[in-house]
Image (tube, grey):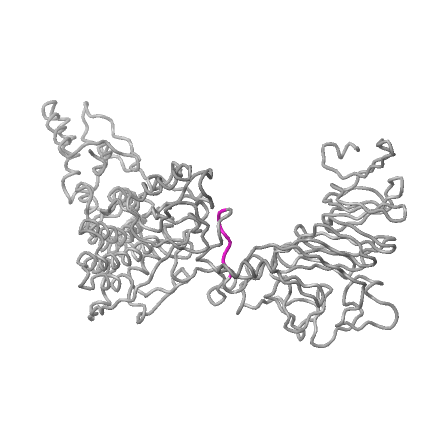
Amino acid sequence: MPAERQGEITGFLSKYNKLGEIQATTLIGESVMNLKEVGGSIYAIGHNSIAGGEGPCALTGEYGGFLAKFDAGGVCQWAKDTAQLNYIEADASFIYAVGDTKELESFDLSADVTLQPNGDEDDLLIVKFKLSDGAGVWGVTRGGTGDERVEGIAMNGANLVLVGRTASDQLDNGDLRLKNLQHHAAEAGKDTRPLNSGEKTMFVMELGADVVPSCLTVGSGANECTDAADSSEGKTIAAGKCYIDGVCHANDAPNPSQPCFKCEAGVDQTKWPAEFDSVNYCFIDGNCRSEGDRAPAFSKYNQASVCEACQPSVKADGYSLVAGHFHDRDFAIAETERCSKGCKGEYNQISAYGVVFEMQSNGCQVMPDMVPTVTVTVDASAATLSAGQKVAKAIKAVSEATATNEGVGRAWVHYHGDSSSCTKTALGGQHEMCENTPSASADATAAAFETVLYYGQAMARVKVQQGLVILKAELSNGALGATELADLKQDIVAHMLVTTYQSAIHAAYQVGLGGADVAEAQATAADAWRLIQDNWAGSQDDKARLASLFDVETPPTGHHYCTASVLLTRNLPASSSNHYGSADADGARSAGSLDMAFGVVAKGKDHVEAVAGGLGMEVHTPKDDDLNPGRTYLSAADLGVLKATYNAEGEKQACTMPPPSPPPPSPSSPPPAEAIDLQESNSGLTEGEVAGVAVGAAVGGIVLLGLVGLVLRSLLFKEAKPVFTCLEKATPNEKK
């Protein structure tokens, strides 16, 4: 082996005598895939992507494969760069080689014929060469909407026979069409589409003698299909026909591999058009998809998505969300793969937002609509209501809702609007929302905190919408007791407030930036704070500090955002220990649709652990930096983190609180306290303990008493500016 090829993978051709002894070895390409002996010469095909060889046997590796001729002694006579080919046959005059388009980008068979793939699916690649010098005669690709693969070829007299498998709905060869009966069987029992059925079938294909294609008229003399490479050069194409990829097509006939492209004989008879049929198809990732085709699964072995499909009227260049669903893409990527009892790995069916999903959901869950049967009186002042005032009306309606007073319907109209009569907007998503509603505001606000789902739906809005439908059903059937209903109402209100919390944090950030928009940001923050404090369930100390922070008289500081973010995050709205979503009774399922009803999942974490135990799996353990490690239904994950605060590298920044003002000069004064990371601060001191410190200071000395007095002043007086010291370590909600 030459020194420059040492350590590399290389193809070789070796000659042995009858005793199995090597007589000669020739190196060529990176791998030799198949050989054919004709008239004492050896013809080889293989794979190659590197330059090498000399003279007539030199290769560039440009197309990924080669065809070479060797004499009886194994000496190379000539070599040609080709596409990757795997099978070879020959007659007395020609070589036939077959591969697929899996690795094909572009192959110049001759000066005027270039073979290219029709899409991402693997098609058959069939090429005919002259035996004498390896010159290309013709080449074609054959395939349908799925993958094709050849498993072997042979000569039947002068005809080439191929045996292989196809996953396409149909496979055309000239005027003949093979229908995939496996697809028909699959479609008879499942709600699937032909292009996405995925069932394979075997095929046998025979290619007859070369003839001039029916749509071509050649000049007098020789048959140009054998005298030159297969092209339309020097030929006349019949009117109303296309001649593309070596095949005749009627006007408006689809590309067999890419049916969304059709012959447009009046535009170009030799090429498929650049524009696809966007009425009946989507063109996604280089492939045509029929209307209704479902998106592929996100986890291995799972069924195709039930809430994402080709809907050309919604989005022609990608899959879109099916109405009546929401889709959590992050969860879809991480969810448990299809399994049954005894499967390995982690069981992960609760999302980072605490929503329980049934297995193989692909992050899909039903998001039902409601048609209110109540009319909400709107007076002239309604148009001027602030966002906080609109949410307050929805909260009041939820709190007062009973089975007979239409409270849920009123809450729905206040929060979502009446879709039958409102002015709608699509915002950042694909489905329209009523303008100027808390629901639409939730979608817009969530985008700034990255708590918006893949198709533009705010997680908070999703939880509210599902919660209201669940509440209406439970009030009607009377199955839940007073405590359970109170918990359900509390959780709906909590997620209505999430957007208000985010608005307050965002406004605080804008106040901290200063500039001409400070007054508007202060007004927004004050409006949000009024609703938050009316529904406050956290520390009274933190409430007082936030009241001071959001007072429009409080001057802007660089710590506005951190103060609001940390104090609100550690004082989330009151919520229950419930989970909601769609849960499996066990994992022994292979679902082609969402078949688990959504609702209250009592003791959701316990339920998931029980199912995981029955499968012999461990429940998924979130990463250390997860905002919801306990997978509760309401957590810091619901608030998210304001994207505008990330650094240039896209990293989240930890908040640190300012040091206290230095005390009056004194020999015994302690050094100033250092800035403290508020996200991890927690001293465990209660207000009573602080008072105890003050009493101890009085006994110990006047100077220390003065210092503690400053601290107490910042803790106890609403109008005092926020002053944060080591005492800021207290987290009242975590005290025992």
Residue 710 located left or right of residue 436: left
User: Percent position (x, y) of residue 72?
Assistant: 89, 42
Residue in the picture at 17% in, 51% down: 482
Residue 135 appears in which quarter of the rendering?
A: bottom right
Q: Is residue 125 left or right of residue 628?
A: right
Which quadrant of the figure has residue 419? bottom left
Say if the magenta span includes residue 233: no
- Percent x, y of residue 558: 30, 44
Is 421 or 223 nearer to us in this picture? 223
Image height check: is 424 above or below 164? below
Image location of residue 195, percent across then percent down: 56, 60
Above or below: residue 9 compared with residue 457: above
Q: In terms of depth relative to the viewer, which is nearer, 505 or 149?
A: 149
Answer with left or right where residue 303 lies relative to residue 133: left
Q: Quadrant of the N terminus?
A: top right
| Residue at left offset 22%, top offset 34% | 730
Q: Quadrant of the C terminus?
A: top left
Residue 455 % position (x, y): 42, 57
Tell which of 440 and 669 is nearer to you: 440
**Which one is nearer the viewer's eye here, 200 or 571?**
200
* Location of residue 538 by image quarter: top left
Residue 295 lies in the magenta stretch: yes
Total tally of numbered discs in the picture = 0
Magenta stretch: give its range. Answer: 293-299
Q: Is residue 564 left or right of residue 100?
A: left
- Residue at the extreme bottom of the image, as rendered: 239
Q: Is residue 216 above or below residue 181?
A: below
Magenta stretch, main secondary structure, is loop
Using the rendered image of the protein, determine whether residue 74 is visible from the camera's viewpoint.
yes
- Whether residue 660 is visible, yes or no, is no
